[in-house]
Amino acid sequence: MDRISAIRNVEDALREFENGDADLAATERRVAAVLRTYATEFDGDDDVYRAVGDDPVDGTVVVAPSEPAARERALAASGLGDETGDDPDGADVAEFDVERF
């Protein structure tokens, strides 16, 4: 799925929600499915990775050129922002691995 198709599918889902033809939960599922399909079919030099491990990083899906970059992006997307996943006091915030999705 290319970017334009993904945007059109999201617009269709929002339109159905606005018209009362779909509830919020159904709209959320549809938009998430569009995003997941777009991410897994992403056409570029990067790969799609998913973080597996501790919350809040677990389940985060990112597009990155390598596993180290995916790890950094997953941390940033989860609000942890530090490549090591450590807080300033030295405590481990989240332990996780990244895998191709």
Image (spheres, helix red, strand yellow):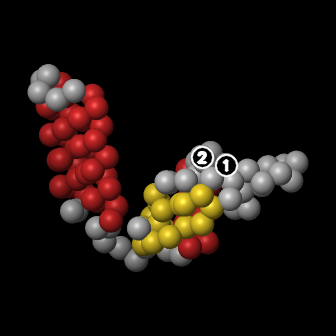
Local crowd at mark 1 within 10 Å, few (<14), some, or many (≥20)?
A: some
The x, y position of residue 19, in whole percent, is 12, 24
Q: Residue at position x 48%, y 62% from top?
A: 50
Residue 36 location, quadrant = bottom left
Secondary structure at badge 1 equals: loop
Circle number at residue 31: none
Look at the picture and state if 45 lies above or below 85: below
Q: Residue at x 11, y 27 (%)?
A: 21
- If you read the primary sequence from the N terminus, does the residue marked by circle 1 or circle 2 appear first? 2
Q: Residue 56 placed where, x, y %?
A: 60, 46
Is the C-beta separation of discs 1 and 2 under 8 Å? yes
Residue 36 relative to residue 12: left or right: right
Residue 54's x, y, as percent?
63, 53
Looking at the image, which is closer to me, 82 or 50? 50
Amino acid type, callout 1: Leu
Residue 53 relative to residue 37: left or right: right
Residue at the disc numbered 2: 56
Q: Where's the C terminus, which quadrant?
A: bottom left
Crowd rating for badge 2 (residues with CA inside 10 Å; few <14, some 14–19, many 20+): some
What residue is drawn where x is 14% and y is 22%? 20
Is residue 76 in view from this perspective? no
Expressed as whole percent of the image width and height from the top left, the position of residue 69 reads 58, 69
Dot 2 amino acid type: Pro
As drawn, 76 above or below 2: above
Q: Going 18% across and 55% down the picture, which residue do you hit?
A: 5
In the rendered image, the quadrant that contains the N terminus is bottom left
Query: For numbered disc 2, what is the local secondary structure?
Result: loop
Spatial CA distance of label 1 from label 2 is: 9 Å
How many marks do you count on the picture? 2
Label disc, if present, on residue 80 of the rendered structure: 1
Q: Does the rendering let one see residue 38?
A: yes
